[in-house]
Image: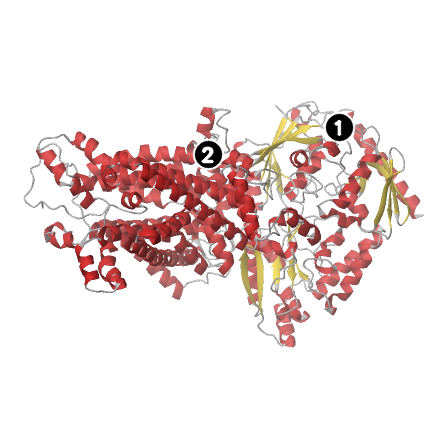
Amino acid sequence: MKHAHRILKTTAIAAAVALALAACSAGGSTDTDSAASGDPISGGTAIWAIGAQPTAGGVDPMIATALAAQTIMDQGYETLLTKDDAGEITPGLALSYEQPDELTYVFTLREGVQFADGSEFSAEDVVYSFTTYQQATTSKKAYLNGLTSVEATGDYEVTFKFSAPNGPFLNAVSHRETFMIVGSEWYGAATPDERLRSTFGTGPFQVTAWEDGVSLTLTKNDFYWGEETPYLDEIELQIISDESTRLAAVQQGTVDAAYFSDGTIAQQAEQSGFTIGDPAYTQGLPIFINPESGALSDVRVRQAVSLALDRQALVDTAMFGYGEVSYVTPSGDPVSPQVDDNTPYYTRDVDAAKELLEEAGQPNPEITLSYFGDALASQHPIYELMQQQLLEAGITLTLKATPTAELAPIFTAGETFTDLVSLPWSYRADPTFYFDPFLSEAGAMNHWDGNPDADAAKALLAEAKSTTDVDAKSELISELADEVAEQVLVLVPMTVPVNFEVWDSEGLLGYDSDPYSSRYRLAESWVTE
Amino acid sequence: MSLKNNVAVVGTGSAPSVAVAVPKRARRAKPGPAFWGGAVILGTIIIVATWMSFWPPYDPLTTVAANIEGMSAEHLLGTDNVGRDSLVRLALAGRTSLLISGAAALLAAVVGAALGLVAGYVGGMVDAVIMRIVDALLALPAILVALVVGVIIGNGAVPLIISLGLIFAPTFARVMRAPVIALRERDFVLAAQLSGVRTWRIVVQHLLPNALTPLFVQFASVASAVVLLEAALSYLGQGVQAPEPSAGRMISELTRFMQTQPLLIIAPALLIVLLSAGWNLLADGTQDYLSPRRETGLAGKRRRRTISPTASSRTTPTTTTTVTSTPQEDSQS
Amino acid sequence: MTRYIIGRIFSSVLVLVLLSVIVFAMVRLIPGDPVAAFADPANPDPVALAKLRTELGLDEPWITQYFVWIFGVLQGDFGRAITQPLDVSELIADRLPVSIQLSVMATVFGVIIGIPAGVLAATRARRLADHTVRGASFVFLATPPFVLGTVLILVNSVTLRLPLIGYVRLEEDFLGSIRSMLLPSLLLGLVLAALVARYTRGTLLDTLNQDFVRTARAKGASSTRLVGRHALRNALIPVTTVVGIELASLVGGTVVTEAVFALPGMGSVLINGIRSSDYPIIQASVLVIGLIYVIINFAVDLIYPLIDPRVRVHS
């Protein structure tokens, strides 16, 4: 029953998508008054101002993990499946998939797709990609737990076999920035250097030039499988690291669109006539806890800390409203449970907090919070306000601004930290991966070994990771999120947008933001003049 | 053109024997407007900062009102992005900056002068090695030194003072070394050595006082530079950390409000300008006071000036501002 | 003279060697991890990272690492950047000219504004012109560069809309390149001008007060001749020193200006390298900046004998 339902659903979606695409390419709207809402125009260059360029790994999907690289690679490379804005799985390079049993996935690939150099895309390339991912530097293989084989069972059919149920797998292959498909011929023949600096994919735009510190150029893929898309000839990504200067570029009109990480600046851009996209609240600000020593080893102290926080006030005052109260799964992730009045210890109650502290025998605990001192400056007021809020309950929070370089060893070499450390992160393909770092065995921020407070949560996580049923998994994640909040295994002041996208809606048309910050709609956008 | 006169005047520290011989009239009786200007600026900041430290109308670390409010009766300079009173925070930022600049300059002076004295007096190989190390230190970017010291000792005011002191010590070393070299061959030093006076005593009692003028001037100059460097480091995230107020960090955090509430960055920027200029004026004023020059220049070129009877045939001792290096020691190294 | 030059070359080399050792040790003392840029913060794979560290030779004893690096440097190879997909020499070859152009332009502004201002102040000592110049110098010397630049850029973006942001390569468009650097180098140059004006004024006044000058004036020499021939030459000495030092320090010290005006220079390379603990980049940048510093110092030392006869006498 399950399988048939799945096929039906996917086929229906595929059909719907095909219909939609057909509609698009049949010709735009009936409004022929102005180009502003008229037919797409082929050609032209869109200029988008970004804040940072890709770093280690360049634009090679087998190596690069930086966010700056992800949002560029996803223009050049495509994935087997994708997700729509509501979080439903939609076709990508694969038109549909089947699960004959819990351990097997069969993907039926789209035919007639070519890489940007003209070579044909087929099942071989999928096999090549996934086998390479399993040996690559990037840790994406964590999503492939238990994968025993990937085989081309037809020119356009690939079969994955697992030794144990892998819950996150489908989410991972439908995230635009995780398992990007590379070609065995084109990518395979390129030198490591070339792969770092340009892309070899099937996507609508390929990275063809990169001037260090200045700009990256994305050129239209003439062989793209979209009927008329992409319309743009080129996208130029201008690198302007200073946000105020980027704002000036927007105000001056020298760029068509820009990213901002600061909501107040994005708002100013809006005031000068640019459109702001719905920001995706997917940058979680998890504050990891080390309960091995100090006041936080007592769950009551942790609960008191959580109670003493007024999260909404943090959002309103420190971030000017550009944030959302959230579980450790960011509220902007379509599959994330949403915080409500019943979320344990999320509603501020200073008196209850003081009571808990008394009970624990620690009326005035002192804890330290380390955070990135030289980055994400717009988030520092959050910690400053937290300090004030906790003081009202008698908790002394010492802020330790630490250079980025000094905090890195915490997640690269598993170094310990004192009490609390704030490590902002972004969207993960699968919700279990928001819990992994501090709950699973190999988690770099996991200091709960041997601590019974985390047992229930660990069990829930293990279950969620091996559940492939979407609804059951959703339930488990909800339970897990509440359990984590109940035991205060991590502190989450809020979630903020990874970035705010602003664009000139009269210069760049057909564009809108998406909750994954992937800018996939650039494939359907065009520029006037 | 007498070369010997030039030697005595340009670039060397004022030698005591010459100073004694200068007629009283040539020496300025009181410090000039530059000195007082600098003193007043710094003095005002000290007073306001002290007042705000002990009797602040608001807690500088607590939210007391809505954020980004402009000037008002309750909040003379408005509130910052978290609703804290700006005036109090600014005053404390001034205090921090003043303390850091003074302490860093002092540390640099002590360490640098010691190095320069040793290098200058002992000479030879020791001199060469010390000065090469000094050169290497001068070539290091300030941010790197600050970062290294910051991570070894931790962040905050004290590590900042240490790093900034280290960054500027080399300039003091150079300033100290030049007059020491010029003086060590002089009769009174040789005499002291012959009489068996201990080396350190010679250095401290005879050589050090002669280099005091450039030292004082250099102190204020360096302090002025430290103010700017500290602001830049805080701007880059290395200096004084949240929630302590710091002018440089205020600017970096609040630049995003430049178009909505410019007061938020104008005030800290002005503070930095005032502090830095204050030290600079003090430096200039001190130099004028301790080694005045007749600033007649070429004024009154309409009529020929005869040499006035008050002019001394001995040139008034002056010191060229030796902020960085003087030609002498480079040619002698 | 030859002995002098050889001596200076020798000590310059010594300084560079010392610098290389200092920076090599410094970057490894900072508790950062160069391979952190490869890690997915939520999904770090310590095993893969350890493997990466070994591949990059970071596990070797420090002495080995140092000599491997130095041998490479002596052959012109600064190694491969860790956090960027570039050869470090490529990176520096791209960025250094930008910084040098900025420094040179700033220095030119500083000198052509500063020296006349200083002369003006000295010849009109204690009068309005003097006070104006001195006052302006104090203000310029004291203004932090990051504020003024941002203000001007934002104001410009809604008024004049001149192209102030970004960099045009020199080889592509000479005039355009100069134009793209006009404002930042002017801002930096004004600070230098203030310094130059002070020194010029100071030494001019010193020189003008000396006996020989008074004698010359008493004999009827015109002021211009006096200023031009005797006084200015003396004034050039400390000015040259200061210009040399500032020129050298500008090359690596303009991080903020580069960020504000979006110029791809050495300052941002250095600060990004420091933030991500990219050893090859930090080491190479500091060494190159140090080399420039040493070269400029050397050049300044060579110029001294030309303007200051005493140095010739001494050596």
Residue C156: mark in rendering? 2
Q: Residues within 10 Å of mark 1 (few under 14, many from 20)?
A: many
- The dot on residue A224 is 1
Distance (Cα) linking label 2 and label 1: 41 Å
Q: Which mark lies nearer to you, 2 or 1?
A: 1
Secondary element type, mark 1: loop
Q: Please state which of residues C55 and A93 is positioned toward the viewer in this rendering.
A: C55
Residue B17 vs residue A8, the one in the foreground: B17
In which image quadrant can residue B206 be found? bottom left
Q: Position of residue A372 (x, y in %)?
A: 57, 54
- The x, y position of residue B323, in whole percent, is 31, 47
The 10 Å Cα crowd at callout 2, few under 14, some 14 to 19, many 20 or more, is: some
Q: Amino acid at mark 2?
A: Asn
| Numbered circle sitting on residue C265 | none
Determine which quarter of the picture holds residue C222: top left
Q: Amino acid at mark 1?
A: Tyr
| Residue A460 seen by the camera | yes
Mark 2 vs mark 1: tell me if same chain. no
Please state the horizontal and vertical placement of residue C146, each as a whole percent of the image.
44, 43
